[in-house]
Image: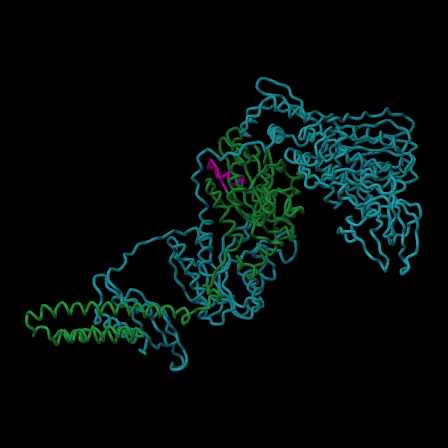
Amino acid sequence: MNILASYSWLKEYCKTDVSPEVFAREISLRAMSVEHIDVLREKFAHLVVGVVVAVKPHPNADKLRVVTINKGGTSVDIVCGGVNVEEGMKVCLAEPGAKVMGHDGKPFDIGVSTIRGVESPGMLCGPAEVGFDALQTHDKYIWDLRMLTDASAGTSLAEALGMDDIIFDLEITTNRPDAKGMIGLAREAGVAVGGDFTWTPPSLPQGKKNLPLRVIIEDKKRCLRQMAVAIKGVKVGPSPWWMQKRLLLAGVRPINNIVDITNYVLLEYAQPLHAFDYAKLEGSEIRVRAAKKGESIMALNGKTYELKNELVLADAQKPLDIAGIMGGEHTGTTETTDTIVFVASAFDPVTIRKTARALNLYSDAQLLFEKGLSTEMPPLALARAVELTLQIAGGEIASEVLDEQVRPCKPAVYSLTPRRIRDRLGVEVSDEQIVDILTRLGFGLEKSGSRYKVTVPYWRDHDIEEEVDLTEEVARMYGYHLMPSVLPVAAPPTTPDDPTLVWEMKIKRALAAEGLTEFFGYSFIDARDLERAGIAPIQAVRVWNPLSEELGYMRPSLIPSFLRDCAANAPHTPTSEVFEISRVHIPREGDLPREELALVCGMYGGEDGEYAYRRVRAMVETVMQTVGIAYRLERASEETGWHPGRTAKILARLGNEEVVVGILGQVSTAYQQAFGLLRPVMMTSLNAELLFARAKERRTYTPVPEYQASVRDISLTIDEATTHADVATILEKGSFVRKVELADIYRGQGVSEGKKSVTYTLTLGAPDHTLTSEEIDATLRGCVEALQVRCGAELR
Amino acid sequence: MDLLQQLSELEQAGILAFQAAQTLDELEAHRVLYLGRKGKLAESMQALPSLSSEEKRVAGPRANEVKATLEGAWEAATGRIQAKHDAEAGEKERIDISLPPLNRHAGHLHLTSQAIEEICGIFSKLGFARSRHPEIDWDYYAFESLNMPKEHPARDEWETFFVDDGSGKVFTGPRGKMVLTPHTSNGQVREMEKGVMPIRMISLGKCYRRQVSARHLPVFHQFEGLMIDEKVSVTELRGVFDFFVKRFFGPETKTRLRPFHFRFTEPSFELDISCTVCKGTGKVKDAKCKLCKAGWLELGGAGMVHPNVLKAGGLDPKKYNGFAFGWGLERTLMMKSGVNLDDIRVLYRNDLRFLSQF
C-alpha cells in the first residue's frame, strides 16, 4: 500500500525542519520506506503564471489561435488549441525547458516549436498536462487559474498555487493502516526523525435534537461501532483550493466540499467516513444489518450489486451503503443537498475482506477496513469532519451525536522483559532507551520488578499481538543500521546437504561437460502438449486457477516440454544436444502429489540414427558412471511413443532387484510429428530420483600395467544382424585382450547387401612381460577364428 | 710425409665443403663423406698402423686435430644452416593468426543452475546445508503455520495458485487447501519438524505466483535460509547477510536492514544492498540511476522467526530462537552486474541462442 504524503501537511503535526532527503532516509530506516521524493518546485520548473493579453486567429489553421501572454514584464505569442482561452484569463504557461504530461501518459519536453508556420516559445497547459487529470474537464480545456490564485504574471506555478511542497511516495506495510493517515505517519516521523508530535485530538460537538436520527446495530458480530450526526443548512459546492490541492497531491479527485471532506479526513485520520443526503433517507433510522435476500444496491461506481447477506447500512426501506466498502449512488450528496448525515463505523475486518471478494468490489475504505481499524477512531474522524464542514460548507449540527458500540475498547496489556529484547537483538539497548522509544510511540509503560507492563495504544490494537511485537518497535527505532554485523559464533551443525540435490548438481555438471546445453523450464504444461506425448491430462496435477490454459497442468514428465522446446529451437538451431533435470509431480489419491526428480537428455535433428543413438548412449553412460550404478540395456520394441527398432530399456540392479531406471531411444514418428519436428529426436528419460537416492561415489584402483601394451586393428565383414555386443563379447574373451574398441562401421561399396564391415581396435598386454609378436599373432588368430565360428565373420 | 699431406688436404677440402653446404641434407652428405664411419678421414687413418712408431707419434695427434677441426666446422655449418632455416620459417610456415577458434562442442549450464551453485556454495561456508521441501504443499505449511491464520489480509500479498481436485474444486486435505508454494518459507516448519537441532538450512526451490510481466514470472526461484539455535540474534543475521553479499556481489558492497512487516518473523526487515550499477550513489553520469532507489537495491526479506512459527515447528520459543531470510534467485541474478536482462522471461524460454551464451 503506497501513499503520497505531503511534507507540509506532515509538518502540521510533526514539528521538524530537517531536509526532505534526511526525512526520507530516517523514516525509511526506522518506519516506512520512501520510494520516491517529488520536489514540486523542480517538477513544475519553467511553468509560470501568464495573463492572456490578446487572442488572435492563427493565419494557417482554423482550430488554432495565437495567444499573446504577459509573462511578467515581457510578452510572448503562443499557439494554442484551447477553446476556453479569453482575454484577461490567468493560465499556466509552459516555457522551453518545462516537462509536461502528454495525452499518452508519457512526459515530454517543451521547446520552441513552429506550428503551421507560427513560432511558439512554449505552450498553454491544461490541468492534465501539469499532472492533475482530475481537473481536466475536456480535451481542449486550458487551465483557468483565476479562481485559484492572486499571483501576478511571471510567478512560478508552484508558488502561485501554494504547491511549493515535497511529496513522499511511501510504502506502508499492511500491518500499519493507522500510518496511512497523516496523523499516524506524523507520529511515526516524530520518533523516527526527531520532532514534536503536536496533534491534539478534536472533540465531538454538542448534539441537538432538531432532527430525528437513530442508529441501531443489528449485526453485533460484524459491526463493532456505529456513529452518526446530521448537519443542516450546508452549502454544497467546490472545496476551497487548499483542500482540493491536498487531495490532488495525494492522488484523489476533488468532487464537492462534502465528499472532499470525507476524503480529506480519510487521508488525515485513515478512517473512512460516508455522507448521506438526509432528505433521501426513508425514516430516521440507520440500521447496520445483514442484507436481505433479493435486496440490491447501486453503488457509487454506477454498478448494481445483488446482495445475499452482506453487511449493509440501511434505512427503513433499502440498503444505503455496502458496509465498509462503498456507498449507494442514490443517497449521496449532490448540489441540492441541504442536510447531510455523516456516518463513521468500525467493522470486523474479515467481514469486509470477504464481502469485497464476493462482490469483486474494492475501494480505499475497504482496503483500510480489512486491515483492521481501531474502534476508537470513529469519534475522532467524525469530530474532524464536523469541524471542517462548519468551516467550509456552513450549516449547523441538527441531530444528536449518535454512538452505538458493541463493547468498549479495552486496551491490551503485555509484559515486557528488557533482557529478552537485548538477547533477541544482540545489542545492549538500555531500559531507558526502551522506555523512551515505546513512550514516544504512544505505549503506556509501568515498571514492575525487572519487567514492564505495556499498554497498547488504541491505534495499534490490531498489529501489536504479543510481547515480541514490542521488540520490533524498539529495534526499528533504535535503528537496524546501527546494529553490528557478527558472524554466528556457535558451532555449525553437521547435517549434510540433501544428497539428491548434490547428485543433481554433479550430473548437471557432467552433462554440460559432455557438451550438452541445459534446458530450464516452467513446471507448467499445456494439456495439449501432454496429449501430444501420449499422456492423458488426468495423469497430471491440474492447477485450479491457472493464468492461462497453456499453463494449466504441472509436468508429470519432462518429455512433453522437452519435445516442445526442441521443436521451438529447430527452425534456428537445426540440431543440438540438450538436457533437463527437474522435479515432476505425479498425482496421488488424497495426498500431496509425489514429487520426484526426473532427467531427460538427448539430441534432436540428427539424421544418422546410429550416430545419434551412440551419442545418447554416451549421455546415459555419463550419468550412470557418475552415479556409480552398473546397468544393462534390453531391446524394447513395443514401447508406445518409441521407435520399435531403436529403443532400449535401461535396467539396473538396485538392492536385490533389477529395475527399469529409464528408457533410451528414438521418439516415435507419431510423437515427433505431433510436436511438429521434421527430423528425429533421440533421447533418454531417466528416473533421477531413484538413481540419485542410490548414487555412490565409487572409486576403484587398478594398477597401471607395468609392461607395454600393443595395439592392433581387426577388420571383419559380418551380417547386419550380428551386434556389436556379439563381437565385443568374443573379442574380450581373447587372451591378453585388455580393451576392445569399435573403430569404424562401413557399409556400401565392396560390402555386399545385408553385411557390414567393422573395424575393432584391440589393446593387448600381459601383466608380467611384454608380448612377443608370436603371442600377438596367436591372439589375433584366436579371435578371428572364434568370430568365424560363432558369428560367421570374414576377415577383410 | 704422404699421410700428413693427405690429412691437410682433407682438412681443407672438408672445411670448404661444410662451408659451402646450403641445406642440412647436403651437409649430412658431406659429413658422411668426410667424418662418416667409412668416410675420408677414416680411410686415411687406415694407413696409420703401417707407419713407423716415430711417424705414428706425429700423424696420430695430427689426425685427431683434423677430426676436431672438421667437427667444429660441421657444427658451425649446422648452426649456420639452422639459423637460415629458422629465419625463413617465419615466412614459409606462417599461419593466419586471425583464424577463428576451433572449439570442442561445448555444453552450457543454465544461468539459474550456475546461480544456485554459487549461492549455495557461499552459505555452505557458514555451515548452511541444502534441504529439499515440497513445491506443492498444504496451506498449513505455506501459510497457517507461518502465523497467517485463514482470512488474514497478509495472505493477499501472495497471489496463490491452487490445485484442482479433479472435479473443479480446490483440492482440500486434512491440512487445508493444496497450493503451489508461493514462497519457499513452507520449508521452515517442515525443517523444524525433522527435530534435529541446531538448524542451518538453505532451501532453494521453485515458487509460483499468479503474475507475469517483464519483471515477474509465474514460476520463479526463491531461496530460504533458516538458522535456529539456542541463542541467535539480529546481529548474527546481519553477519550472515553481509558475508553472503560481500562474497556474491563483491567486498565493496554495502548493506542495510530496513524495517518491514512479515507475519512469520518479528522483528522483520528488508535487506538492501548498495546499487551494483551506480555504486550506491543513486546517480549515473548526473542522471538518476534507473535500477535503484537512491543508491539502494532491495534484495529480500528477513527477520527473527516468530515464536508462533517455532511453536508450530514443535520448538520451545523460550529455549530456541533464530532467523529466516528469503529472496528471489532471478532477482539476485539480475542484480549481479554483468548479466543485463531487460526481460526476465527470456530465462525460461529455453531458446538455445540465449542458453548457449552462458
Please name the residue shown 78% across and 38% down the image: A164
Percent of width and height locating residue A235: 92, 35
Is B200 inside the magenta-drawn segment?
A: yes
Percent of width and height locating residue A501: 47, 49
Task: Identify the image quadrant of residue A466.
Answer: top right
Q: Could one spot residue A702 in this view of the protein?
A: yes
Q: How is the image coloured?
A: by chain
Q: Is residue A243 left or right of residue A351?
A: right
Q: Colour of chain B?
A: green
Q: Quadrant of the N terminus of chain A?
A: top right
Task: Identify the image quadrant of residue A31.
Answer: top right
Query: Residue B287 or A181: which is nearer the viewer?
Result: B287
User: What residue range appears in magenta?
Assistant: B188-201
Is B211 inside the magenta-drawn segment?
A: no
**Residue A668, placed above or below residue A161:** below
Q: Is residue A246 left or right of residue A514?
A: right
Q: Colour of chain A?
A: cyan
Query: Residue B295 or A376: which is nearer the viewer?
Result: B295
Query: Residue B211 or B46: which is nearer the viewer?
Result: B46
Percent of width and height locating residue A191: 67, 28
Task: Identify the image quadrant of residue B60.
Answer: bottom left
Please name the residue shown 69% across and 34% down the image: A23
Q: Could one spot residue A309 in this view of the protein?
A: no
Q: Is residue A184 left or right of residue A531?
A: right
Q: Is residue B355 left or right of residue A496?
A: right
In the image as oriented, which residue stretches furthest toward the top?
A449
Query: Residue B85 or A465: which is nearer the viewer?
Result: B85
